[in-house]
Amino acid sequence: MKGSLGWARLGGFSIFCLVILLGFLVAGNRSAEAQERHALVIGVDRYENVPDLLKAGNDARAVAEVLEVVGFRVTLGVDIQRRDYSRLMSEFTRAIAPGDEAIFYFAGHGIEVDGRNYLLPADVPAARPGDEDFVRSESIAVDHVLDMIGRAGARVSMVILDACRDNPFPREGTRSLGGGRGLGRVAPAEGTFVLYSAGINQLALDRLSDDDPDPNSVFTRALLPLLVEPGLPVQGMVRRVRQQVREMAQSVGHIQFPAYYDQLTDDYLIVPASLPGVGDAVPGVDRPVAVDHCTSARADWVVLRDTDSVSALQNYAEAHAQCPIFASLARERLADISVGSCLAMAGNDEDLRSDGRVALSSILGRHMTREFAYLVSLASADLRAVIDACSAAHEINKENAEVAFRLGLALHADKAEDVAHELYELAAKTGHPGAMTQYARTLPGDEAETWSLKAAEAGDIDAMIDLGVWYGRGYVRPFNSFRKDIELSEHWLRKAAEAGSRHAMSFLAKFYENESGPLYNIDEAVNWHRKAAEAGNKISMFDLGFMYMIGNNVAQDIAEGMRWIRKAAERGYPAAMANVGGWYHQGNIITQDFRQAAFWYRKAADAGVTGAQYWLGILYRNGRGVAQNDQEAARWLREAADREDRRAQYVLGRIYLEGAGVAKNERTGVELMIESYKNGLNWLTEALGSGSFDREVVAELQRQLHAEGHYNSSIDGVYGAGTQAALEQIRQ
């Protein structure tokens, strides 16, 4: 078990330090099957408005060189601005084809705002406490990076972010734009490996001393030789990186111990075992040297021997497993925690497993591409306390299946899915129904079926739902096929629904309402949506409400439809919140109220609804329902534009032309408006036709059209036939 991890937060900003290795739906190392290997590597040392860094650029160059040696087609960007990042990322993801492998690497400053992580480009503006929104709008959202790479369709994708540098923003009195150092969490998808370059409140060292001659940071110098070691799985690489970084830091009296979360489903090898000696091709990369593991264990024990922290002792025992004497001392201290404490603190099984699925809308129609995933909710319990208590109990009695299962659920909720998987397997093999269900979700299709059937036949509702969904769609997750059998799908979903599961009721309704599906029966769909909604399922509340709004096999009843959709919104369903915001905004079926519109749009926007992000930006731009705020308008419109909302792209382009809430930039503004036009929106040509732009803007448009090979006339700033023809060409 790792120690408690969290953010050091001050003044709304936090510095985050992490390295993310993201392998979407990894199914073992199959590099021979990959068509191409792509890498985008970025390092920023020279910042225009915040303190420079020393070795981020060197780290990026070294990583780029190593990745080239092991077969990646590398694009390197050093000291790039935000616009350069957008261009490189677009080119990078466009080059990725299904079956490819992809790596994204960033070294530089990073910051966290309100639970979201951002990377700072070279031109990030100077800021003071209270400028969080402005800085955020000019930075790079990590979740956008993950989303872009995830949508590119690579077979294996890895993202490496080393942003654990010192606070780039100055303090002002007792306030600051972020803590001096700290950790930030992400919420990665299944198949993700997260490696933090340091632990809680730790600073990742650039160097071991002022005269340290090594061109790379402490973390990177440990990472580089292991990246080229043949046959070394990512998990093994990380264990060795952690130990080496810890010992190098301790040699200068510093504490730096990378923490990690592993959600990979199998080993992934950056360099296959069949390529020995590849590390010799990388200049300056040496093999790791042997270390005396008990030296650091002895030093740490002096600090920890009197602690009452269970998590600290467990972290110590794991870190120093290669020094048995001191590891056993730590385990003896842990022996005081009982199995009963774990079970009492974790609560009952329903507390741990209810609301454990994400998006019941993941199986049919417009939701078909979303993956059905199981995440646990421990909102009623202190997650860290549960992990600490159950970890200690598991150390005492590893044969106790219930303890192993409860600990697995808690770790799953805490994103430590590698350890959770091992615990599920341990408990599943003793016949524990819930553990069998969880274990099945990590396995290939045929094995998943075997374990899910065992759990379902033992009465586990979640296993019944899994079988119903998997039989219905023919896969457990993308690239993990499952035997398709519609009759069995209906059988297991109906069995779970009749047992009272509101989730199964909603799934069953989704199957019945699919007009192109073999189970299409709209009467049954309405029936099961109603039962699920009345039982508290927010997705069925929304769907039932929509049926009433349009009169789909029920008598049209606008008021009843609004009632159900509002109930779903009040329970946090994103689409419902966006709809309620739209009602108040438009004022067609409810009294117009811009304040209420902004309230609901914000909730939906925070949940990632692109349309709500656009409209919230418009409300801020116009000062309707909220105080007029150009920076907030730009921030929300950027969120929507980054998700390909063509309206947001156009309006954000106009904002850059005006310099409202952002630095005025005609080139960026025109680029965004061209992108919106390429995406099918005619607002650009309509504005040009009405003479809304001055000659300088039209000239910039002509220059960009010329650069793309569409415009060959003079750059005269006149919107004439040549410019019109060029715009028509870009849509062909």
Image (spheres, grey):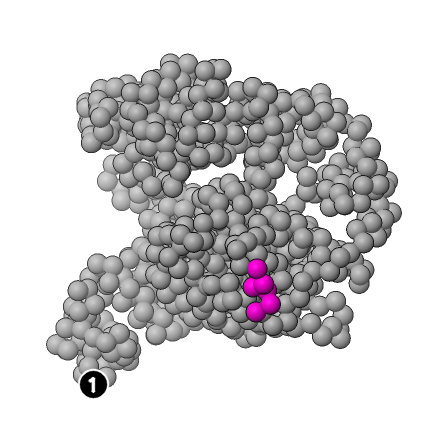
Position of 575 relative to 686 (above/below): above
Front residue (pair 707, 537):
707
* Left or right of 486 on screen, residue 102: right
Res. 450 visible in picture:
yes
540, 565: nearer the viewer: 540
> Would residue 128 be seen by someone viewing this image from the given angle?
no
Residue 138 in percent (x, y) is at 47, 64
Asked whether, in this view, residue 32 is left or right of residue 204, the answer is: left
Choose top left, top right, bottom left or bottom right for residue 670: bottom left
> Which residue: 63% across, 27% down?
404
Q: Is residue 251 above or below residue 449?
A: below
Residue range in magenta is 276-281
Dot 1: element: loop
Q: Is residue 277 magenta?
A: yes
Examine the structure image and report whether residue 580 is included in the region drawn in magenta: no
Looking at the rendering, in which quadrant would you find the N terminus?
top right
Q: Is residue 307 left or right of residue 107?
A: right
Residue 165: quarter of image:
bottom right
Residue 155, horizontal then vertical, whole percent = 41, 50
Q: Pick the residue in front: 225 or 363.
A: 225
Give the residue drawn at x 67%, y 22%: 400
Residue 195, horizontal then vertical, whole percent: 60, 51
